[in-house]
Image (cartoon, rainbow, N blue to C red):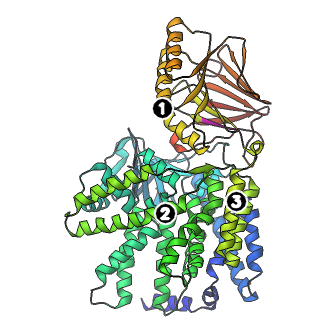
Amino acid sequence: MLFFQGLTNGILKATILRVMLRDFSFYLFLLLLPVPLIFLKTLFVVAYLLIVFVLLYQFKREKFFLFFAFVLLLFASSFQKYRYFKQLENFNGKVIECKGFVLKQRNSEFNSVLDIFIPVLKTRKGNIISFFRVFEVQTPLFYSDLRGSRVKITGILKKRKIYKNTFSSNYYYLLGENRLFYIKVKDKIFLKILSKGQIQKFRDFLFRDISNYRTKTFLSALVLGEKSSIDTGFKYKVKKLGIYHLFVLSGFHFGLFSLIFWIIVFFLPLRRRYKKVIVLLTLSFLLFIASFSSPSLRVYLMLVVYLVFEWDGINIKPLDAVGLAGIILLLINPFNVFNAGFLMSFLISGGIVISVREKSFFYSFLIIPFVAFSIMLPFCFYFFNYIPIFSPIYNLIIIPLIVFLFWIFVLNIFLSGMLGGFVQWYVFKLTGFLNFLPPFSFEVFPGFIVIVLSIVSIIVFFWKRDLKILFLNSAILILISIFIPKHLQKDSICFFDSGKPHCFLIFDRRESILVNTGDSNFISMCLKKELGFRGIKKLEWLILNDTGIRSIDRVEKLCEKIKIEKIVVPSKNLNFVIQQRLKWISSFFNIKLIVVGKREVLKLSKNKALSFIENGLVLNIKDKKIAYFKENSEANGFDYLLIEKIKTINKKSQRGAIIIGNDNYKKRIYFLEEKGSACFFLK
């Protein structure tokens, strides 16, 4: 014990840390960000190189040694990560065994997906291939709730198949998320529950006095960050409002929990430093609930760094605590640079610390939402393609309401449920208020220059520390992104895997065309999402390649939920009953019905033309051609889609198609390149 204490004191008093504590650690963290990107040869590094030149200009010579030392460590860590993943690839498809603790659980209708913290992962022959990682485990059956349980798993290690589609950095992004490899369990007998977990018992204890299911799921998401049970529509609304961070365990939650735990231990007859240690140990439980996410790790490491330095009598600045926590996580996993949560969490924290130095509480409360919004702009551009314009204003309104709910909920626990009815009433009113707020956001189509300008604005802020400059740059960037000329906006195609016939949505600039209907309920939800992102209130064209009775039923259900201007159907296989049904739908919903002959070409607009062929259709958009063939023997039982000369944002290839969407679409896309065209086979 004395040895470790002496070693810790020696490290803390070393010159290298004394140099770092001169308001330097956070800027060192910014300097380290481009190193993994250089190692991975990503274009994004060009923007971050600007940070290097700006910051090195300010540093004294004594700090160059520190910078290059950490650069070497980061290169070594990146290389070690590659070796580790190469080692996992050698065991791809082989049976592995492990024991671990279930951190998170996502249930579908038929099975469960578990995030399991695994201390040691090994093969049946005893080869140890991994230490201390969180693996995604896919199980064949539905489990009620295994969170916190200790389990034993025997399954097959599998690597995800990454196809060349939207993001050229998708492979590295999954590395940063630690989701490239997963474990597939074939049968229930290969997942044994060794001991039931305490997380569910803790959750039941917290919500024992809340009877309403929706209130319980809302509070569970707010207090514990468990968003899996929240209604999809409400989750989407919260994202568009720009307040999704309130439902993620981050500094906001750790601050509230720290205050609660500090009030509890305040009256204990212990020294102040020991009380802080007790609070820190209590907060470590939240890390397991948050599945070691970047925001929770950032806050926890900041508290650890601050406590350790204070224990040795060193007064560390908050900005240095942020920087040291970022350096530690970056050295552990360099691929965090592709994690949007990691980048936004640390950069926004650094910007907030700089902007609220020696400011009053009221001034800090007013300015923090605007600083956070300004710094997150480039990441909204790059990762999410939309900007929640009213996010700062909504945060100013909603955060006090959330804090009040949090304290009432905690007080209800200590009063044994005396305030349970009031808590449920308050949650009902609060969710109604959130649903009432208009989600005003813009979809943006930024080029690389917009991203560079965004990062330059952040550099100027960290360099000059002038909020006026940051706000001015942010406003200019928003205007640039919104009012980009239409010819710079990308053509895009969305695929919806919702049963046959498959459905896809085409955006030509700001005009929309939907081919086939698929599952009407699922498609209407996806359509509202995609059209809302682009600020489009109605669907211009609905093209039906399939005119069966089920397809017509889906059209009617779709018209009840989405405003449609025109419906186009082929004259082939159009019998009298179907034709009369379509006429009734068009008259009832005030939609124009167009019937196209076999060899007839329909001009949809100035640049678009449509023609139906024997087993599909051909859509011409300027010099681009999209051909869709219904399931047939030539396509080996698949629907066949041929896309020609479609613009792409894929950085590595000038051919292909843009797939706009996310995992909610459950799309399965198999990409092939063939003579300058992109062929998609949709299972």
Which corner quadrant of the image does residue 202 belong to?
Answer: bottom left
Q: CA distance from mark 1 to mark 2?
A: 30 Å
Question: Which numbered disc covers residue 207?
Answer: none
First-in-chain label (2 vs 3): 2
Q: Residues within 10 Å of mark 1 (few under 14, many from 20)?
A: some
- At label 2, the amino acid type is Asn
Residue assigned mark 3: 477
Q: Residues within 10 Å of mark 3 (few under 14, many from 20)?
A: many
Magenta segment main secondary structure = strand
Residue assigned mark 1: 561
Measuring 20% from the left and 68% from the top, which residue is drawn there?
415
Q: Residues within 10 Å of mark 2 (few under 14, many from 20)?
A: many
- Magenta region, residue range: 490-494
Q: Horizontal and vertical percent for residue 45?
A: 73, 63
Residue assigned mark 2: 395
Q: Find out whether residue 491 is within the magenta segment.
A: yes
- At label 1, the amino acid type is Lys
Measuring 77% from the left and 80% from the top, which residue is drawn there?
57
Compared to residue 168, the image places residue 474 above or below, namely below
First-in-chain label (1 vs 2): 2
Compared to residue 539, the image places residue 352 above or below, namely below
Compared to residue 286, the image places residue 554 above or below, namely above
SS at circle 2: helix
Q: Are marks 1 and 3 in contact (CB under 8 Å)?
A: no
Measuring 27% from the left and 86% from the top, which residue is drawn there?
267
Q: Horizontal and vertical percent for residue 544?
A: 59, 21
Nearest the eye: 471 or 635: 471
SS at circle 3: helix
Q: CA distance from mark 1 to mark 3?
A: 35 Å
